[in-house]
Amino acid sequence: MPAARHDEALTIAKKAAEAHKVGDPRSEETKLGPVVSNIQFDKIQRLIEAGIAEGATLVTGGPGRPEHLNRGYYVRPTVFGHVTPGMTIEKEEIFGPVLSVISYSDDDDAVRIANDTVYGLAAYVQSGDMTTRAKLQDSCAPGRSRSIIRSGIPSRASAATNSQAMAANMPTGRSMISLR
């Protein structure tokens, strides 16, 4: 996220995460069921705790189950802000409902952060400027899949809705550069 819009992104991500009802996957109201196993639940909990211990800002969620669930592998949708390179939650793929918001200062910084990963299954570049988008797409590390490339920017009025959808459906790992 551009550094100048970091706090705005956190507000949008918090609202999106808190809108996800966690519970019985058979219920029509549920947006998020349990993770697959106790091993995965424990791993996600350790990573959330690492984010807190390493100084990321816990925006919403956090360790433990949602308040209304006292058993099962249910994870609280969690958003971290002010995540910096080198933090465990920046380096590890969490495979749970945890979003880490990382800021960048300029295009080169965004590409450096995006390419500094051992994962990189996909790249997402969003820019209203086709030249900028193409330059950044070409700057992705060799061998990376560029499966989703958006060349347009939604109107300001729909930007919040678009950002909520992206936050709610973002794949795990570091894969998005958003330029506005």
Image (cartoon, rainbow, N blue to C red):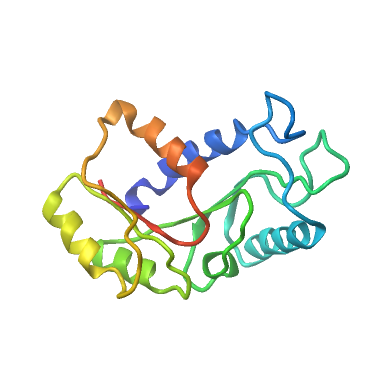
Name the foreground residue: 126 vs 11. 126
Residue 17 x %, y %: 58, 38
Residue ID at (38%, 35%): 162
The residue at 19%/55% (across/down) is: 133
23 shown above or below 139: above
Of all residues, the one furthest to the left in this rendering is: 131
- Give how far across and how far down residue 171 sits, in percent: 49, 53
The answer to whether 86 is drawn above or below residue 2 in the figure is below
List x then y, in percent, for residue 111.
30, 67
Residue farthest right in this picture: 70
Question: 125 or 157, which lies in front?
Answer: 125
Residue at the image position 49 percent from the left and 57 percent from the top = 82
- Figure disc tally: 0
Q: Residue at x 24, y 39 (%)?
A: 153
Residue 60 x/y as whole percent:
62, 43
From this view, report whether residue 10 is shown above or below residue 84: above
The answer to whether 159 appears left or right of 51 in the picture is: left
- Residue 24, quarter of picture: top right
